[in-house]
Amino acid sequence: MSSVLRPAVSGQDPLKASKYRPISSHLAIAPPVSVVIPAMNEAENLPYVFKTLPGWIHEVVLVDGNSTDNTVEVARELWPDVKVVKQLGKGKGDALITGFAASTGDIIVMVDADGSADGNEIVSYVSALVSGADFAKGSRFANGGGTDDMTPIRKLGNWALCTAVNRKFGARYTDLCYGYNAFWRHCLDKIDLDCTGFEVETLMNIRVVKAGLKVQEIPSHEYLRIHGTSNLRAVRDGLRVLKVILKERSNRRSLRRRPHSVLLNSGPGEVS
């Protein structure tokens, strides 16, 4: 695509070349990348999160869920140009929707604030997008992925819910309830997010398939939360995910099946 260039060669206009952000010695991109991080009382974890974020990203948008610790102050110390947005509602879904609206990048990356995600993987997500995918979906169970955080019960629940989505919507996902994803901004116009809780990732995964968008799974490793305890509750949130699946399936007229809309088992930057 025209948005991906090789490094500047001798004789190339340096002003023209300078608008491209270098990712590696072999890749540079023009699209600005926004990283959206929903956070509530994550001051102790933010140093680990920001440490792995690549310096070439366009902006970091921290959505503060009314933290009672110094989450905002720590974020500003670690990343002076961070854009802090105060969350007015409640829930992870509400926080992400708020962050998406505040971001200005052409590409948006979702990253959790608990230290479980490795920011160094962002290059794989971005490479997939500039190579042709609309939505780059992180997967802990794709070849090369992994998780240190999921209990056997949660793995079983994730598998069951993922299987239900694949069967009901014609997807081929290997993971469903994972919050590390990236997408082009134009996707937001087609998926119309309207939920507030942890089920937001499932809703996104279903609606990108229903919209016929090109999806590529990215192998990702989920690490243990470093400090604090998660607000996720397996049974409660599992039931909310199931409710979303049933609700989306009942709206049959909005489902538009397109063969090969989900791209799987491709390496970073490759589209099958």
Image: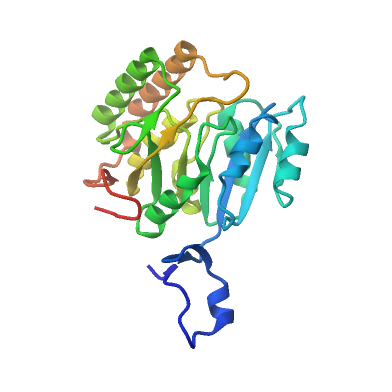
Q: Quadrant of the N terminus?
A: bottom left
Left or right placement of residue 27 versus residue 39 in this view: left
Q: Position of residue 208 (x, y in %)?
A: 38, 42
Colour mapping: rainbow
Position of 222 relative to 99 (above/below): above
Residue at image location 57% in from the left, 20% down from the top:
230
**Front residue of 228 and 171:** 228
Q: Position of residue 172 (x, y in %)?
A: 26, 36
Give residue 19's quadrant in the image: bottom right
Left or right placement of residue 166 versus residue 21 in this view: left
Q: Residue furthest left?
A: 259
**Front residue of 189 and 261:** 261
Q: Position of residue 24 (x, y in %)?
A: 46, 62
**Front residue of 158 and 247:** 158
Residue at image location 57% in from the left, 51% down from the top:
34
Give the total of numbered labels. 0
Residue at image location 74% in from the left, 38% down from the top:
74
Q: Position of residue 98 (x, y in %)?
A: 63, 39
Left or right placement of residue 60 versus residue 244 in this view: right
Position of 16 relative to 84 (above/below): below
